[in-house]
Image: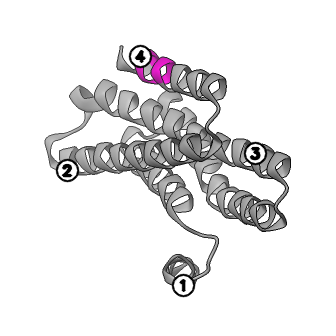
Amino acid sequence: MHHSLEHFLDQVARQGSWFGGGSVAALSAALAAALLEKLLGSTAPARRLQRIRRECFALVSRDAEAFARVIAASRSGNHRAFTRTLKSATEIPCRVFEHAQAIRAASRAAAGSIKPQFQSDLKGARAMAGAAAEAACALIETNLMWLNDHTYTSTIRSRLRAAHQHHAR
């Protein structure tokens, strides 16, 4: 485990690596879900967090792969391919944002049932989910700026607002 995590960190730190902000946001969400999952034990919310954790962990690699496709399309000069790959790549931070909102909601719901000695882990999970959501939003906004497609931008922003409002309850 140590070596694979160290390898991942080396990849993120390496110039020219496809692992960047999207992969880090996805890993942050996966870590937040794992920490909260542990606190909740064998419950239905914990099982939901397990699914979120697994998907977010898969998004770590998917983001790097999607970014590589965006760069290849950009270098080819094919505007349609660039637009298509960038929209596809934008789906990943959107999913991370949605999952981060779900984790934040689950942490709020669990707050009263977590023993005082584990509140620091709860706060850590909430902070990691918040960081994942913020990083995902930054990536999405950057992609939307590059796309310069007002209809698509409106659709994505509506989706993010809906995720935020759905989990704010």
Residue wearing tag 4? 165
Residue wearing tag 2? 120
Q: Residue at x 39, y 51 (%)?
A: 35
Q: Nearer the viewer, mark 1 or mark 2?
A: 1
Q: Is residue 36 above or below residue 82?
A: above
**What kind of colouring is applied to the model shown?**
one colour
Q: Residue at x 46, y 21 (%)?
A: 161
Q: Residues within 10 Å of mark 1 (few under 14, many from 20)?
A: few
Nearer to the camera, 87 or 4: 87
Q: Earlier in the sequence, mark 3 or mark 2?
A: 3
Q: Earlier in the sequence, mark 1 or mark 3?
A: 1
Q: Main secondary structure of the magenta part?
A: helix
- Label of residue 83 in the image: 3
Q: Residues within 10 Å of mark 2 (few under 14, many from 20)?
A: few
Residue 96 visible (yes or no): no
- Amino acid bearing label 1: Arg
Q: Residue at x 31, y 42 (%)?
A: 126
Q: Helix, strand, or loop for circle 2?
A: helix
- Label of residue 14 in the image: 1
Nearer to the camera, 99 or 88: 88
Label 3 – label 2 distance at C-alpha: 43 Å
Q: Which stretch is magenta?
A: 161-166
Q: Position of residue 133 (x, y in %)?
A: 42, 42
